[in-house]
Image (spheres, rainbow, N blue to C red):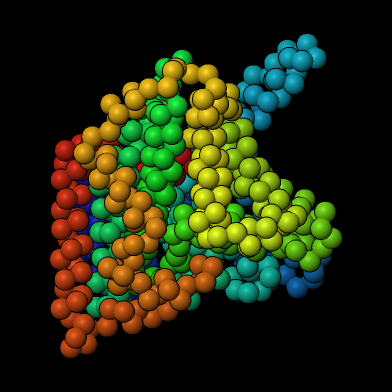
Amino acid sequence: MLFSSPVFLFLFLPLLLLLYWSAPRAWRNGVLLVASILFYVWGERFFFVVMLASIAANWLIGLALDALEGPRQRKAMVAFAVVLNIGLLAVFKYTEFLVGNLNDLLAVVGVAPVSVVSPHLPLGISFFTFHALSYVIDVYRRVATAQRKPIDFALYIAFFPQLIAGPIIRYHDIYKQLTRRTVTLELLASGTERFLAGFGKKMLLANPLGEVADQIFALPAGELSPGAAWLGVICYTLQIYLDFSAYSDMAIGLARIFGFHFLENFNYPYRAQSLQEFWRRWHISLSNWLRDYLYIPLGGSRVANWRIYLNLFIVFFVCGLWHGANWTFVVWGMIHGGFLIIERLGLARWLARQPGAVRHAYALGVVSLAWVFFRSADVTQAVHYLQVMFGIGGSALSLDFLRYVDPLVVISLVIGSLAAAGVFTRLTSDWRCRAGQRDGVLHPPLEAVRLDADGRWVLGLRLVIALTVGVLGCSQVAAGTYNPFIYFRF
């Protein structure tokens, strides 16, 4: 069930709001949990039992970790939890990938291939697995106590705004909110505004650009021209940011409506002037997760240089593979990891002496070219696509790409670029929070939308703009236009 689907917008969400606000405070987590399970079942049917089994197992492991005192026993228990969760992810997400690569190796030595039935990939398994790992590791580190109420713990894992496509909410950031949270008029207004802003970004900007990118990346190898290839990359570069950040905007907005403060997940990553800065701005919740639960435990930057480079290699290999069971994602991760290593070897010092435009062009160029691997069906297609972009192979240089360009695409490119650059930041109630944000910390109180005498008409004007955007977005939903969510497949 997409946030931008008619069923969610006009049935699920209104009924949930009615039930939630009608229920006694003590029942509200239960209402949210039941609604979240129904939200998941809508898309998964039988495979919701995988998520429920993960919830039950990790809740029991958390209780065991809290009860155990001996260091060895606790290490054994957390190791069991890691193996269990990663094993679950490996079985459902990577079986086909692993068996396919094994059969390629077996074919080289003349051995018959292995035949395995690939299991169905449950929606959001990468996200709820990382949520579960965050919980057990936080309990093991004693930065949070085990959650003794199964409903509250299940809500942490299954809360519908972040269940399918994030952001990845770490347990120690939210556990107090599971039992104590207050919804103010300011928070409700801010949440509504944020949801509608994300909804409009998705429907009015990301979708038109994504349709062009899909058409171009689907072209046969011999029909792809350099102009079309560059247009496809530009459209996809904007689409993936606008699409994923729109989902995060909607998730953050919905969470506020129910009293939760979620982490920011994007901080205008295309403004970055290095790959290091890009990863402080892009998918912040994943970056922080990998930093705190993988990079630092491996030794982080406190070890010899060769170990730092190895740690970065491991982290970005995992980052790529987490996104999908395909070598294209691994190569994408290795490109980012490789440039981070090169920056540490001296490129960062050289860039620091260059004009800002050069630094920005470097970062955006690497990121955009790496997206070719992320979007392509396989490595062969990605390599050919990159060759065509630089005039090697493909069809002759021509203006054939203009057939993909219409007024809607031009408007989406212009406004989408301005949005990605943060030009419209001050039009939202979050701008002060974003200005003070550092590495995905929780939002401070929303002073920007306090309803004082001077602020009421400002907030009212913002909501009128947001509602207008929402109405325009709903018109696209009603028209049944192209409407995927990129990160649902992860």
Residue 159 appears in the rendering:
yes
Front-most of 358 and 201?
Answer: 358
Seen in the picture, residue 322 relative to 82 is either above or below; the reply is above
Front-most of 474 and 229?
Answer: 229
Q: Residue at x 44, y 17 (%)?
A: 395
Question: In this view, which residue lies farthest toward the bottom?
Answer: 453
Where does the N terminus fall, quadrant-wise?
A: top left
In the rendered view, does 481 fall on the left or right side of 343?
Answer: left
Q: Where's residue 50, x and y in %? A: 51, 44
In the rendered view, does 356 fall on the left or right side of 462?
Answer: right
In the rendered view, does 165 fall on the left or right side of 365?
Answer: left
Q: Where's residue 43, x and y in %? A: 36, 41
Q: Where's residue 21, x and y in %? A: 24, 70
Residue 317, quarter of picture: top right
Front-most of 1 and 77?
Answer: 1
Residue 315 appears in the rendering:
no
Seen in the picture, residue 204 relative to 176 is either above or below; the reply is above
Q: Residue at x 59, y 40 (%)?
A: 332
Q: Residue at x 50, y 56 (%)?
A: 357
Front-most of 369 and 136?
Answer: 369
Q: Residue at x 54, y 64 (%)?
A: 170
Q: Where's residue 67, x and y in %? A: 68, 71
Seen in the picture, residue 326 relative to 170 is either above or below; the reply is above
